[in-house]
Amino acid sequence: MERVQFQQEQMLNELKDLVEKNLFTDKEAKQIMKQRTIYETALVRRVARKADFLRYAAYEMSLEQLRRKRVERLKLKPAPASISDYALVKRQFEIFERAVRKFKSDVGLWVQYIQVAKREGARSLVGRITARALQMHPNNPSLFILAASHELDHHSPSAARTLMQRGIRLNPESIDLWKEYVKMELGYIESLRRRWEVLGIKTSGEEETEGREETEEEGNVGADARRKVMEGEIVAQVISSAGQGMNDISLVEMNRLIKKLTTAIPRVELFESIKDVISEFPTTADLRKRLLCHLYDEVHKVLGNEPKAVVFRASRFIGTEGVVGIEKALKEIEEIIGKGSLEYKIFIKEWIHKIT
């Protein structure tokens, strides 16, 4: 019980400060002390449960939410920060820290810890937590996606890209990682396009105005390189790597290579997922068309006349040409794999179901 007593002693100054600021009454402070003691006692028992940590953390979150509401309602005058301004949030972090140390293998717990730190704006802490989580769980794609998202939120696309590449090296069979990688690069293109428009920088390969200064992210990328970026060359190379499983990616900002994909990847499903990302992402129609054409070419190059791949490629006619498009798709499937194939019959059945 020494740990419980120690924690009680640590609470005293914080609770005293809350009472002095009239944010909590003496009675409320005593109730907080009592409730925390119950939670601390549960955590030091021989077999502490994950639920005990989560209940404790949820209690501290509710206290912090109440404190902020009362600060806003009382309209306290600005003053130097005191212990009660940050103690409740700090306690949340400490509870999650104790939890992940005890339940290291629980990915969900790590994710919750990261989300709480992100919500409180603790950027450096988020970085440290994600690094530790990835060290413990290098084969969990969701952690790489979460870590890359954090870097993007803080305008570090290079760091985000490095994380995604590392994740793919360790988990080449993860369709989610490839999807998010493509989505990330599409987002990068869109952010550059908007930034360059504001700065008046040409993206079509024209000469730049002499003496123009570019931001750090553009670096020394010339007009030709900018044109390639805007035309989706980075995304196209990611698609090629995902499909072929044999070519390294060579990007403008990339020094490291993405190794081979394993044969465990369900290739057609991977291409379908990437197609969905490209089709749904809010980018220019020209870029979308160019990338989809590259995707279909890659399918043909990698999978040839594999029945599922043939059906996938034939679907490019659908959605743009109506009934004529369906007829073109059927004709292509019939010519390559024949009417008697299972894939042809499934395709017919699916479209009959859609239009009836």
Image (cartoon, rainbow, N blue to C red):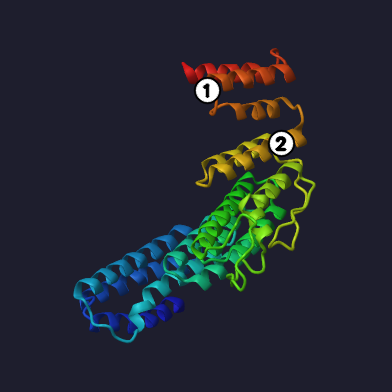
Q: x, y (%) of residue 302?
A: 76, 36
Residue occupied by mark 1: 322
Residue 209 higher or lower than 311, as above or below: below
Q: How many dots with numbers?
A: 2
- The front one of 103 and 17 is 17
Q: Residue at x 65, y 46 (%)?
A: 174
Taking the image as shown, residue 229 lies to the left or right of residue 302, namely left
Determine whether label 1 and label 2 are within 8 Å by CB.
no
Q: Residue at x 37, y 73 (%)?
A: 88
Quadrant for residue 263, please give it. Answer: top right
- The front one of 141 and 53 is 141
From this viewpoint, is residue 132 visible? no
**Sequence order check, earlier mark of 1 and 2:** 2
Look at the numbered disc 2 and give the secondary structure of its residue.
helix
- The front one of 8 and 290 is 290
From this viewpoint, is residue 285 visible? yes
Q: Residue at x 37, y 62 (%)?
A: 58
Q: CA distance from mark 1 to mark 2?
A: 22 Å
Residue 229 higher or lower than 76, as above or below: above
The amino acid type, in three-letter code, at marker 2 is: Asp
The amino acid type, in three-letter code, at marker 1 is: Gly
Q: Residue at x 45, y 69 (%)?
A: 95
Taking the image as shown, residue 213 lies to the left or right of residue 236, namely left
Q: x, y (%) of residue 261?
A: 75, 47
Q: x, y (%) of residue 316?
A: 61, 30
**What crowding class fits label 1: few (fewer than 14 Cα within 10 Å), some (14-19), or many (20 or more)?**
few
**What crowding class fits label 2: few (fewer than 14 Cα within 10 Å), some (14-19), or many (20 or more)?**
some
Look at the numbered disc 1 and give the secondary structure of its residue.
helix
Residue occupied by mark 2: 297
Taking the image as shown, residue 119 lies to the left or right of residue 46, namely left
- Numbered tag placed on residue 232 in the rendering: none
